[in-house]
Image (cartoon, rainbow, N blue to C red):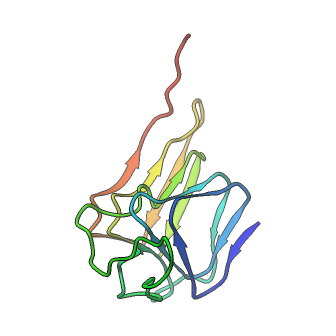
Amino acid sequence: MNGYQSSTNILITGTLILNGPVTFEPIIVKYKANASMQINNTLTLKNFGQFREAQFTAVDDNSVGHSCAGITNSGYTGVIASTGYANPAIYTAQSSLSLTNCRFSYAKLAVQCIPPLATSSTYNFSHSQLANCIIGIQLSMASGGCG
């Protein structure tokens, strides 16, 4: 299990692939341009509530968490780029995902869900915000074919 405790700050500079069950307590995740997080199992949000949320934002966003200035390969410039950052901030191919008390800021794509073929899917997005994202939520169908 991947567990991230309350007030943890994470910097993602490439693709972070989480294959086991993931538990987030209130957390701040900062992304370099085109970085992403792929969740291949369950996601549990623990101890969340009003003013206790997960924030997914740009490496250059100094309004939350610790500054990434001086961190090697972070991509930090200190100026928010209009071209966006995370792409996507959260990606899943699971048949369910529930995001509550989350804030996504400055993403090229905040959340991308591609459910498995021939299964019913449930995606919940509640008490959350999309701020200054180019694309908020993208739901796609997995493609199948002959060949």
Horizontal and vertical percent for residue 132? 26, 69
Residue at the location (46% across, 61% down)?
89
Horizontal and vertical percent for residue 83? 26, 61
Residue at the location (57% across, 88% down)?
7
Q: Quadrant of residue 5?
A: bottom right
Count numbered badges in the picture.
Answer: 0
Q: In this view, does 48 lie above or below 123?
A: below
Q: Is residue 93 above or below residue 12?
A: above
Q: Is residue 106 above or below residue 117?
A: below
Position of 81 with respect to 45 (left or right) is: left
Q: Would residue 112 be visible to someone looking at this image?
A: yes
Front in this rendered view, residue 9 or 119: 9
Front in this rendered view, residue 73 or 105: 73
Residue at the location (27% across, 75% down)?
80
Horizontal and vertical percent for residue 14? 52, 59
Outermost residue on the top side: it is: 147
Q: Would residue 103 be visible to someone looking at this image?
A: no
Outermost residue on the right side: it is: 1
The C terminus lies in quadrant:
top right
Position of 20 with respect to 137 (left or right) is: right
Horizontal and vertical percent for residue 119? 60, 35
Q: Is residue 45 above or below residue 69?
A: above
Q: Quadrant of residue 117?
A: top right
Position of 86 with respect to 145 (left or right) is: left
The N terminus lies in quadrant:
bottom right
Q: Quadrant of residue 81?
A: bottom left
Front in this rendered view, residue 90 or 95: 90
